Image: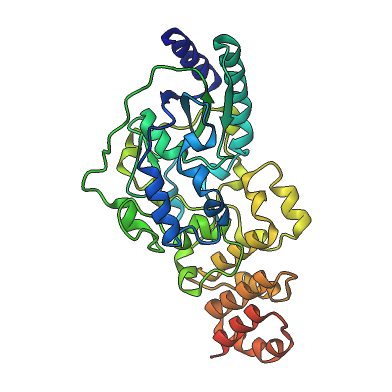
Amino acid sequence: MLEIKQQLIERARAEGFELCRVTRPDAIPEAADRLRDFLAQGYHGDMGWMAEHEIRRASPENLWPEARSVIMLAMNYGPDRNPLDDLAAQDSGLISVYAQRRDYHDVMKKKLRRLARWLSETGAAEVKLFVDTAPLMEKPLAGAAGLGWQGKHTNLVSRDYGSWLFLGSIFTTLELPIDTPESDHCGHCSACLDICPTKAFPAPYQLDARRCISYLTIEHKGVIDAELRAGIGNHIYGCDDCLAVCPWNKFAKQGSEAKLAMRDDLDLPDLIGLSQLDDAGFRTRFAGLPIKRTGRDRFVRNVVIALGNKAVADAASVEAVEARLDDVSPLVRGMAIWALGRLDKPRAKDIGTRMMAAETDADVATEWQAVMA
């Protein structure tokens, strides 16, 4: 089996995976209790699928009892500059590094299929592959396999690639030699906890997704709590703050997979232009990208919040926000009211006197009431 494993590692590198290591399905017994506590605290927010599949997610053995080895693979997607340098670009939106390119699920799945097919044929074994598409706790498994460790921000950290790794896995009935788990190298550092603008970490190694900008701008379908909106800043899809600040990124390397090259038009896009997207325009612009999964309304909601967070109000931004007061989506209308109140409160109050009475959505009416108070 050692020879098969070595050949697998070589093939994985040829496919563009920087890391390929093996662990057992029973390697993360502590994960079940951590998941149970996470759900009990309600930290998963409205990601109900996490609770619905708790038993299967709690242990890889529950996902596929016949599996004897778990092959964890990682692909580097390091950016060409520090995302923190863009926080001051208030006319532009920040899109998480992973989303400024083709959907990594599609790219990695094709590569994993080729590896899994070879492994099945060579070892006469059954295989199953996953890329964030099953109730599977990939980060604990990656740590058990030695790809890195879960930092205090709960994300995977690598001594060789810092914070920027996409993960995939192949389960197999083969008994492959296992690798040594990676130990925790966070030490006394708390940079990732301290930088979070919405205070999403109740304690080291704990995340309250309900306060996480990535969750709020991608997963959360409804109105974002007023107390969290200012902290979102100019993030319009995801957030890399806690990843980017990690000192281990001094060893990070720029990603080299051509199929995951970053798109220039997603690097600091203009907020005003994005706020004007209708559904058809949104679908066209973000076809084949992770951003498309949020839908137009949630995305424009985020863009309008970013406009409202500008430190200096300019006429063009006020006009763009005001245009969204009549948006077809109540979600967008509500955030436009809030943003206009931030940028030009007298104007918002003047408009509110005639628009508030005609509003039929309760959440939007509440936003008007807050501005008029």
In the rendered view, would you say 277 is above or below 16?
below
x and y percentages locating residue 221 in the rendered image: 61, 62
321 relative position to 71: left or right = right
Count all numbered tags in the image, as a single digit: 0
28 relative position to 368: left or right = left
x and y percentages locating residue 339 in the rendered image: 57, 74
Q: Residue at x 41, y 33 (%)?
A: 142
Q: Residue at x 74, y 87 (%)?
A: 358
In the rendered view, would you say 119 is above or below 201?
above
Foreground pick, 349 / 373: 373
Tell me the quarter of the picture where residue 197 sits: bottom left
Foreground pick, 302 / 209: 209
Colour approach in the figure: rainbow
288 relative position to 54: left or right = right
Foreground pick, 234 / 198: 198
Q: Residue at x 30, y 42 (%)?
A: 247
x and y percentages locating residue 240 in the rendered image: 45, 49
Tell me the quarter of the picture where residue 258 sits: top right
Q: Residue furthest top?
A: 3
x and y percentages locating residue 78 in the rendered image: 46, 36
Foreground pick, 159 / 47: 47
Q: Residue furthest right?
A: 280
Residue 143 visible here: yes
Which quarter shows the N terminus?
top left
In the rendered view, would you say 171 is above or below 29?
above
Residue 252 visible here: no
Q: Residue furthest left?
A: 188
